[in-house]
Amino acid sequence: MRPFTYSRADGVEAAVRAGGGPGAAFVAGGTNLLDLMKADALRPAHLVDISRLPLDRIEETADGGLRLGALARNADTAYDPRVRSRYPMLSKAILAGASAQLRNMATNGGNLMQRTRCYYFYDRATPCNKREPGAGCSAIGGVNRIHAILGASDHCIAVHPSDLCVALAALAATVRVAGPQGERAIPFADVHRLPGDTPQVETTLREGELITAIDLPPQGFADHSTYLKVRDRASYAFALVSVAAALDIADGTVREARLALGGVAHKPWRDSEAEALLAGGPATPERFAAAARMVLRGAKGHQHNAFKIGLAERAIVRALAEAAGVEHP
Ligand code: SF4
């Protein structure tokens, strides 16, 4: 690990001021950043400790939703009675991630900002455009079993590793940030980027901006939703494919559908056309299969991960059936 300086922020404004400095990085739970520093994949010159800021509450919002503090721990969020009863898909997604110890330490804001688990990103002996722009991508033509099948580029085929974010994408959450230019709210779909030719830029957050909260809208799809995670081990493993599926069903007709995938792209993959296809008709396995085919219409596999395309199609059908409470073949 390289030498770095450290300061502890005593307020959001002070944190933003310190976080805008050259080579600065925010640290709270540290469950990903410190690993990256130990691997020498990231070399921040200055760490701004934000862990004592008063951003750890979970509160009601005026519109009937919930505000999750950026520094609320993943475990506290998943077990909050309001999250469990009104947003069960979110609670399930959080508990599918990492381990109990990591969930006790990791924060909601940090979960959004965590980096890919592409092996080459952590290995300084191999070229990686994300770590060193212009160096090349070792995963293309290398070992790419865990990599992207949607939205990738010739510069990077990494995937976003979060489970929490997949559920937040399906719920259409809003991310609140504070920065040198003041506060702003970002629709969740706009927070993370596809790699394009700048895979080192993973989010739309500006220099020095700090996530302060995540707002959940009132509609939590509590009656018909689920999070399905397919992985190599039953616990403590990242998703090969995951699906957040939510349906609003009345009199046997789907009024609204939400579908987001994890483990398949550089950001949580939400497909509004597939969601529209599901709306206005009955909740049947045939219609779920049509939506799944639509989600995967542009999918492209690489040497070791083409299996994810069929896996994702089947996972979508299963997740939607589970959310709807219907049998599936
Ligand atoms: Fe780096 Fe992205 Fe290629 Fe992995 S997939 S080696 S993170 S450029």
Image: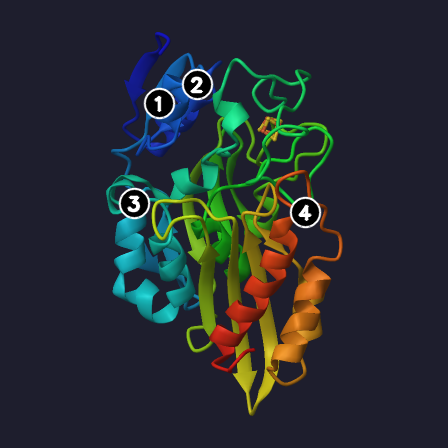
Report, in whole angstroms, how far the alpha carbon at label 3 lies from the one at label 4: 27 Å
Mark 1 neighbour density, 10 Å: few (under 14) some (14–19) many (20 or more): many
Q: Is mark 4 within 8 Å of ligand 1?
A: no
Quarter occupied by residue 154: top right
Quadrant showing the N terminus: top left
Report, in whole angstroms, how far the alpha carbon at label 1 lies from the one at label 4: 35 Å
Callout 1 touching callout 4 (CB < 8 Å): no
Mark 4 neighbour density, 10 Å: few (under 14) some (14–19) many (20 or more): many
Q: Can you say whether 314 is above or below 153 in the image?
A: below
Q: Is mark 1 within 8 Å of ligand 1?
A: no
Nearer the observer, disc 3 or disc 2? Answer: 3
Callout 1 touching callout 2 (CB < 8 Å): yes
Residue extending farthest to the bottom is 251
Q: Secondary structure at mark 4?
A: loop
Question: Mark 1 sits on what residue?
Answer: 48
Question: Mark 3 sits on what residue?
Answer: 99
Report, in whole angstroms, how far the alpha carbon at label 3 lies from the one at label 1: 25 Å
Report, in whole angstroms, how far the alpha carbon at label 1 lies from the one at label 2: 7 Å
Q: Secondary structure at mark 1?
A: strand
Question: Mark 2 sits on what residue?
Answer: 24
